[in-house]
């Protein structure tokens, strides 16, 4: 048993999920051990029934079967909801009244990756709770129950879509929207939902295919929005909406084919929410443009800087009783009229609700927002055993400067800011800069790149 435990790679247990190369780091023995360990963790908390779903990746059926096997060994019963989207999985926790579950998904990562999002209560676990799953395995504490947990299958697709339709009522303006599911799970849900809500829908790549033959399923990268942008312009659509592989992140293209960044989308939603809820706390992710906290404060909100990461943001929202938050990466969390988890379908519905109640075009609504030149969220490879040290040395070099250090280091500079943080899901560093003018941005980028190099970081090129 000890030799087997030594084969479990510790680095796949990340800040808010378990993730690795499917056929190498998430082999069957490893996944069954994770399932049994997680079942032990839940049993100790009095939870003996969970839901389990999976995305469209080729490795997902095998991994899902393995995690169900491990849960059964620990005496935990499973409701298998099959091929599904992460937000539908989150809803299943509410729908079935269970206090745990597993979503097998590699999210927006390359096809060879996969992972496990683990829930307790109605939210995913993170941080030390993820590490506890590893410790249970490493210390040989996984329990084998005398009574094996059972398995039953449930298809919740139509029930979940019914729920979405019940929560979104569009206004009088008729809309045309292009949906790009990127051969992930979005095509199972989004077209039917938004048609029933009253929109005219044009579909791209709706068929789930874990090879992702048309483009990588990450709708927040310009290079993956080419087909969506072309379809919007050719059809005269009011908007284009893309989903990542498991449909918890949204990407948007306006009627002129311009990509809308996550912080711009957040401000659009805050413009609807804050007038109804003056004084509401506005949780601002550290990668956000300075226009977001500035404008949120102008609208009567109370900005609060916070870390990146879907589980971390949801936990902070619960602590602050926040109504809404989001991430530049496209996660949107509505708790004012919804459950508080990241649901790209519901976010799409909220966007169309705003558009259907105004005669202004989406490009005009975004164009009215303050806009400053910035880099994109620039991600570059750095080994897990080095990346945190690079961030710490940049933080030390920034002593004496105004900084925000809730997640990495955001350096407040003359006429702008720069950020360096470690990815919690990959061996990657993440950087972003913004300036009030192009000249400010160039100066800030040059200085930040020098600081990263001096801190022992790798060479990289800024993305725009």
Image (cartoon, helix red, strand yellow):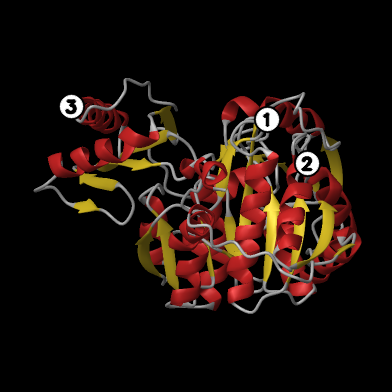
Counting residues from the N terminus, which is met first, the one under dot 3 or under dot 1?
A: 1
Query: Disc 1 designates what residue?
Result: 111
Q: Which residue is painted at 39% across and 56% down in the image?
A: 307
Query: Disc 3 designates what residue?
Result: 454
Q: CA distance from mark 3 to mark 2?
A: 45 Å
Q: Nearer the viewer, residue 149 or 228?
A: 149
Image side of residue 304 versus residue 119, left or right: left
Q: Which mark is nearer the camera, 3 or 1?
A: 1
Image side of residue 287 versus residue 258, left or right: left
Residue 281: percent from the left, percent from the top? 42, 72
Q: CA distance from mark 1 to mark 2?
A: 15 Å
Say which element carries label 1. loop
Q: Which mark is nearer the camera, 1 or 2?
A: 2
Query: Disc 2 designates what residue?
Result: 62
Image side of residue 40 versus residue 301, left or right: right
Q: Which residue is painted at 89% across and 52% down in the image?
A: 192
Q: Nearer the viewer, residue 407 or 102?
A: 102
Say which element carries label 3. helix
Q: Relative to residue 163, is residue 71 depicted above or below?
A: above
Counting residues from the N terminus, which is met first, the one under dot 1 or under dot 2?
A: 2
Query: Which label sits on residue 98?
Result: none
Residue 400: percent from the left, percent from the top? 8, 48
Residue 123: percent from the left, percent from the top? 60, 67
């Amino acid at each position: 048993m000890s030799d087997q435990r030594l084969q479990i790679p510790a680095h796949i247990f990340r800040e808010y999920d378990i993730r690795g190369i499917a056929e190498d780091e998430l082999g069957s023995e490893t996944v069954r051990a994770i399932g049994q360990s997680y079942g032990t963790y839940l049993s100790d908390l009095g939870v003996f029934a969970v839901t389990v779903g999976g995305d469209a990746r080729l490795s997902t059926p095998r991994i899902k079967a393995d995690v169900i096997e491990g849960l059964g060994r620990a005496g935990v019963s499973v409701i298998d909801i099959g091929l599904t989207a992460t937000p539908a999985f989150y809803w299943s926790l509410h729908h079935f009244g269970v206090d745990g579950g597993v979503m097998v998904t590699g999210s927006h990562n390359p096809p060879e990756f996969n992972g496990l999002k683990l829930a307790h209560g109605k939210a995913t676990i993170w941080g030390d709770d993820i590490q506890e799953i590893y410790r249970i395995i490493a210390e040989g504490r996984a329990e084998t129950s005398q009574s094996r947990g059972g398995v039953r299958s449930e298809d919740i697709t139509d029930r979940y879509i019914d729920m979405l339709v019940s929560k979104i009522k569009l206004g009088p303006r008729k809309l045309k929207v292009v949906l790009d599911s990127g051969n992930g799970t979005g095509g199972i849900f989004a077209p039917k939902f938004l048609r029933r809500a009253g929109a005219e829908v044009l579909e791209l790549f709706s068929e789930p295919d874990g090879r992702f033959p048309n483009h990588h399923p990450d709708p927040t990268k310009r290079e993956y929005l080419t087909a969506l942008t072309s379809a919007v312009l050719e059809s005269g659509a009011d908007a284009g909406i893309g989903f990542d592989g498991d449909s918890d992140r949204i990407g948007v293209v306006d009627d002129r084919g311009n990509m809308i960044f996550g912080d711009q989308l957040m401000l659009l939603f805050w413009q609807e929410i804050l007038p109804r809820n003056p004084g509401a706390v506005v949780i601002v992710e550290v990668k956000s443009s300075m226009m977001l906290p500035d404008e949120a404060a102008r609208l009567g909100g109370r900005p609060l800087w916070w870390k990146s990461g879907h589980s971390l943001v949801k936990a902070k929202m619960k602590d602050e009783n926040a109504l809404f938050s989001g991430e530049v990466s496209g996660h949107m969390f509505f708790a004012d009229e919804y459950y508080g988890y990241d649901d790209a379908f519901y976010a799409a519905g909220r966007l169309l609700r705003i558009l259907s109640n105004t005669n202004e075009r989406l490009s005009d609504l975004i164009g009215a927002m303050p806009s400053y030149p910035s880099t994109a969220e620039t991600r570059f490879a750095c080994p897990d055993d080095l990346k945190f040290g690079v961030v710490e040395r940049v933080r030390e070099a920034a002593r004496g400067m105004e900084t925000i250090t809730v997640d990495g280091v955001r350096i407040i500079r003359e006429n702008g800011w720069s950020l360096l943080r470690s990815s919690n899901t990959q061996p990657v560093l993440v950087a972003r800069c913004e300036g009030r003018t192009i000249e400010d941005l160039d100066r800030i980028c040059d200085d930040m790149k020098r600081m990263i190099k001096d801190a022992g970081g790798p060479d990289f090129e800024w993305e725009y």
